Image (cartoon, rainbow, N blue to C red):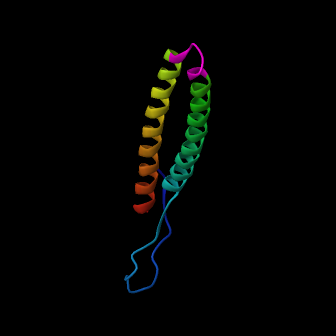
Amino acid sequence: MTVVHLGRAGRDGHIAGLLLDIGVVSADADLESAVSVLDQIVERISKIADELATGSLEDIAADLYESERILRSGTRRLERSVRNLRRRR
């Protein structure tokens, strides 16, 4: 995480300084992108599972549905992390 100090504002010291946290901004964007990619992957897995569930490969479809469930849970947790990261800025 890179922190850049932009100095003091004012002579009286009421505003001690301004920090621009470049690392948090970059992490925020990267994580938001990862959420988007995960959403796309989950949709693809769901579609494939639906197609397999109607045939003789129901066991594989069940595994894919379980993978979908786990990925959705992970995506929600990642989204929560992004929100928390934004709040702390």
What is the x, y in percent for residue 48? Answer: 61, 26
Magenta residues, start to end: 52-58
For image coordinates 38% across by 82% down, the residue present is: 13
Q: Which residue lies furthest to the bottom in this view?
A: 12
Q: Which of 3 and 44 is in front in this view?
A: 44
Relative to 45, say whether 59 is above or below: above
Q: Is residue 10 within the magenta segment?
A: no
Point 42% across, 51% down: residue: 80
Task: Give percent across and percent down for residue 39.
Answer: 57, 41
> For this view, does 30 lie left or right of residue 18?
right
Q: In this view, does 11 lie above or below 27?
A: below
Residue 81, percent across and down? 42, 49
Q: Is residue 57 magenta?
A: yes
Looking at this view, is 43 or 31 the one in front? 43
Image quarter hosting the C terminus: bottom left
How many marks are shown on the rendered structure? 0
Residue lying at the far front of the rendered structure: 54
Q: Which residue lies furthest to the top in this view?
A: 56
Residue at 46% x, 52% y is: 82
Instruction: Tell me what residue is drawn at x 48 percent, y 54 percent.
Output: 24
The image position of residue 66, as x and y in percent, is 45, 27
Query: 20 or 10: nearer the eye?
Result: 20
